Image (tube, rainbow, N blue to C red):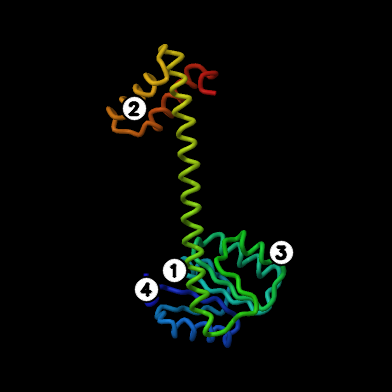
Amino acid sequence: MSAGSLTILVIDENRIRASIIEAGLRDAGHRHVTVVHDVAGIAKRIAALEPDVIVIDLENPNRDMLENMFQLSRAVKRPIAMFVDRSDRASIEAAVDAGVSAYVVDGLKKERIKPILDMAISRFNAFSRMARELEEARSELENRKVVDRAKGILMKSRGLSEEAAYALLRKTAMNQNRKIADIAQSLVTAAGLLDPLEGE
């Protein structure tokens, strides 16, 4: 995605600071920049605008304001670059936990906007990729467990070897044009209905 095609939302109650961010973005070639000075109803504005990236500038954030912005970042699932004038360890940890991609303390300078934005996008993409891979690994592990339980049920009820039980699951999946894990889950569910101890 090129710089010019990104839609960027800048949230900043301070108009002078917002103009610094906007100028830095425009200098970097970003044409679709929306600046919002009032955080009231910001979730609706984000939903309507659907920005690719969000830049939040908090001049002197208090705990409540930071927590509101962290809740926002958890909800929107987009790259977020956050500028603050001062911070403490707890706030930094909360920002990381909330999924803020770049948390910059006392670093609001026009020429720094582009590299910080690029870093926020790269970090967000890397984190999203890792989260997706983790979810796929968990799903694969869960599928294996279900297939193993289904094989056990077939081995016990039909007197089959492990290989024969797996071959039967695979053949049934191919005949029904379904995944082996789906067939296995159906078998485990049915076995649990017929014999509650079997589905355990």
- Of mark 1 and mark 3, the one earlier in the sequence is 1
Which quadrant would residue 173 be assigned to in this image? top left
Mark 2 is on which residue type? Arg
Q: Callout 3 environment at 10 Å: few (<14), some (14 to 19), or many (20+)?
A: few
Residue 157, x across and y down, in percent? 44, 13
Q: CA distance from mark 4 to mark 2?
A: 45 Å
Residue at the image position 53 percent from the left and 68 percent from the top: 80
Determine which of the numbered discs, if any, sits on residue 170 in the image: 2
Above or below, 188 relative to 108: above
Determine which of the numbered discs, if any, sits on residue 122 in the image: none
Q: Residue furthest bottom?
A: 16
Q: Callout 1 environment at 10 Å: few (<14), some (14 to 19), or many (20+)?
A: some
Determine which of the numbered discs, if any, sits on residue 52 in the image: 1
Which quadrant would residue 177 be assigned to in this image? top left
Quadrant containing the C terminus is top right
Q: Is residue 95 left or right of residue 119?
A: right
Helix, strand or loop for disc 3 = helix
Residue 21, x across and y down, in percent? 52, 82
